[in-house]
Image: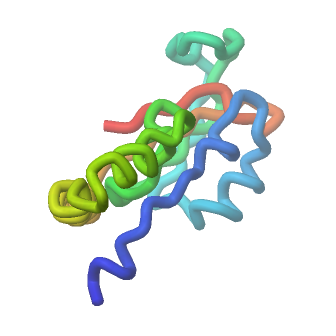
Amino acid sequence: MGLALSVPKDVSYVLKPGSKRSDVVAVLGQPRKSTAISPPRQAPVREGWPSARLAVCDEYRISGLVLTPDEAGAYDNQWSIYPICLMLTAGASEVIMLPATAGDLTVRSLRRYNLLLGYDRSQKLVSFDKH
């Protein structure tokens, strides 16, 4: 029963540079803590993200099942290797894959992380950090 409720949630589509704060709150809910930064300070640099100044920082406490852009492909398989392995082993690969996946989902569901989101003055996302 608990495993059925332990489904990874990909939020990478909303954690992109320039996402509106209202869109992020619609997906993740209200932040646990929100801090106005005055005067605005330089956001930590992330590869592929524009340089900006932080004006607001939101803090969320999230499950390990919430997948950020860094880990969004954790359960995707672009080359369809899984069906090939399943066919080549006549289904025997399930003996390994099913318990491994169930174990990974259980461990992820038990972990908790802080997700810090930084916004500029126009309430656009400029930085995030999951630790």
* Percent position of residue 11, x then y: 58, 50
Q: Residue furthest right?
A: 122
Whether 46 is drawn above or below 3: the answer is above
Does residue 104 appear to the left or right of 30 in the view shown? left
What residue sits 58% from the left and 27% below the top?
127
What residue sits 70% from the left and 64% below the top?
26
* Percent position of residue 44, x then y: 50, 15
Whether 44 is drawn above or below 24: the answer is above
Scheme of colours in the image? rainbow
> Which residue is more in the foreground, 26 or 84?
84
Whether 91 is drawn above or below 131: the answer is below
Q: Quadrant of residue 60?
A: bottom left
Q: Quadrant of the C terminus?
A: top left
Whether 98 is drawn above or below 3: the answer is above
Q: Residue furthest bottom?
A: 1
* Percent position of residue 36, x then y: 59, 39
Q: Quadrant of the N terminus?
A: bottom left
Does residue 119 appear to the left or right of 72 in the view shown? right
> Which residue is more in the foreground, 32 or 7?
7
Count the labels in the image.
0
> Which residue is more in the foreground, 92 or 35?
92
Q: Is residue 104 visible?
A: no
